[in-house]
Amino acid sequence: MSSVAASRVGSWLPSGRTLVIAAPFAFLLVFFMVPFAAVLKISFADPQMSVPPYTPIAELKDGYLHFTLTLAHYRAVLTDALYVGSYLYSIEVAALTTLICLLVGYPACYLIARSDPSRRNLLIMAVMLPFWTSYLIRVYAWIGLLKNQGLINHFLLWTRLIDQPLKLYHNNCGLLIGMVYNYLPYLMLPLYAHLVKMDVTLLEAARNLGAKPWQAFFTITLPLSRRAIIASSLLVFIPAVGEYVIPEILGGSNSLMIGRVMWDDFFVNTDWPSASAATAAMVVLLLLPMAWFQRLQRRETAPR
Amino acid sequence: MTRTHRVLGNGYLALVFLFLYVPTASVIVYSFNESQLVTVWTGFSARWYAALTTDPELISAAWTSLEIALATAFSSVVVGTWAGFVLARFRKFRGQTLFTAMINAPLVIPEVIQGISLLLLFVALQQAIGWPARGLFTIWIGHTMLCVSYVAITVQSRLASMDESLHEAAQVLGATPLRVFFDITLPLISQALISGWLLSFTISLDDVLMTAFLSGPDSTLLPMVVFSRVRLGLNPEINALGTLFIVAVTVGVVVNNHLMLKRQRRRDQEMALALRSAP
């Protein structure tokens, strides 16, 4: 009797397994998913001088619930030259950053993965180390190198390669250098992890069958690392689209990436609804690459 | 590989490492420059380190930042380990796709998005129930959200590569799941926890965006002070501060890696011994 009662109570209570899963699930739901609902809500409101600085979208007046929604901010995001231009510019900068990172990082990863094991760990740790050091300081460091009286111009003037200092920062050149510098480790670590696990016997077989090294590379190594190339490129491209700090410090004042526009909407113009609409648009823009990344990542993390 | 190939390869790697290390090296060198004009060398001096110690704005911000970083490191390791454990050990539960998406997305999603959306959530909450006001608490939650995914992925991959027979053995011998977790799983993944802790600590210590969005009027953190000065250009004090950062992080990472390798070697030796003594 009592055991029947106990089992009935037991079936009402969630099992230990459910509780263990539910705790982190709820945490992520509240602090990652629910905030997007707040963004959506405010993107339909109007800015006003108050605390908080937007109009309520639903109001109880004379016993009726009144909804006041506006699509004006979305229209602005889709048609205003400032927004459209900065979205396109952000995508361009992110794509260029990804491409350069790939061109620089892939050969480096390949060389590290093919060097002997004792040296390998040391080298990849040396790639990882800057990734740990303060991001802000690393971006800041480039000012000292790139400015007119900076290290690079000093060096070039000294070698007589140039006789006028080059303008290297507060423009696209400085921006791209900073972006590539910062995102390179993000690209290299997963790529290296893949290349180092690759089966070398296939390459040996190809060589024994008479393939030249470059043939073996293009027919075996490159196709086999396709998935790792895509995953690590997305790991650079997606966050790069929304980058704020690097363009602010190293980019020119006219090169407006979308992150900067959103920051200004928020802190300078106090136009939270516009910033919310821009945020929502950015999420939509990045949804496809993020879904792609998620698919690739799931294969890695699926329980075996 | 022929000799020329090797020389070319090494030369290329040297260039890449030059690119990775010259900026940080220059920060360190210039931090000892006497001149106010950072890039004009006038002589060796430690005056900017002395200036750091008499900069009240920087010092108070640094203390607040350290507190937040400590709190963030602990909370991220707890939540991240929990999430990583669920990811690695539970097959097929309702909402699994959503769960993995919520772990993976923060790794790539631009911080502006996460910053704005969390801020709007907190503002809406404050309007509805009067809590929480923007300040240290909201920053703490925001920083934790930045770090949880890293910890979860590290723990998950460590667990996935681990032999499950130890857990099974403990369970067969009558240990409760909780006991198995604390006595077997946790010690085995301790290295992943330490790495996650260190990474969360450093992420929290120099995050600008999330901090700017979630801070209130009374909470000024170190990254915000540094950012507001860096925006204006070179600043010798920031070079000194940066050098301290670089040295601390390098020592931390190298020591952690060294301990990890040592432990790995010992474990390998013990395994070899155990195998040899087996009949």
Image (spheres, helix red, strand yellow):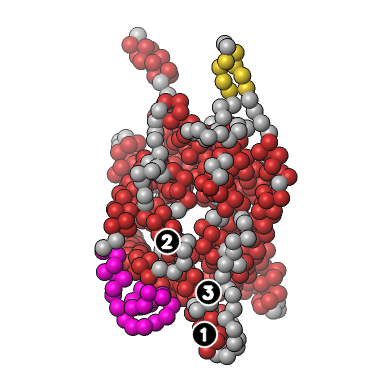
Q: Are marks 2 and 1 on the same chain?
A: no
Label 3 belongs to which residue?
A146
Structural distance between the alpha carbons of marks 3 and 1: 11 Å
The location of residue A43, given as percent across then percent down, is 61, 35
The location of residue A247, given as percent across then percent down, is 56, 60
The residue at 56%/70% (across/down) is A169
| Amino acid on which the number 3 mark rests in the picture | Leu
| A43 in relation to A145, above or below | above
Tell me the mark number nearer the camera, choosing from 2 and 1: 2
Structural distance between the alpha carbons of marks 3 and 2: 18 Å
Disc number placed over residue B65 in the picture, else none: none
The numbered mark, 3 or 1, whose residue comes first in the sequence reads 3
Label 2 belongs to which residue?
B229
Q: Tell me which segment is drawn in magenta.
A: B29-53
Residue extending furthest right? Answer: A79
* Kind of element beneath mark 1: helix
Chain on which label 2 sits: B
Disc number placed over residue A155 in the picture, else none: 1
Residue A239 in which image quadrant = bottom right
Quarter of the rendering occupied by the N terminus of chain B: bottom right
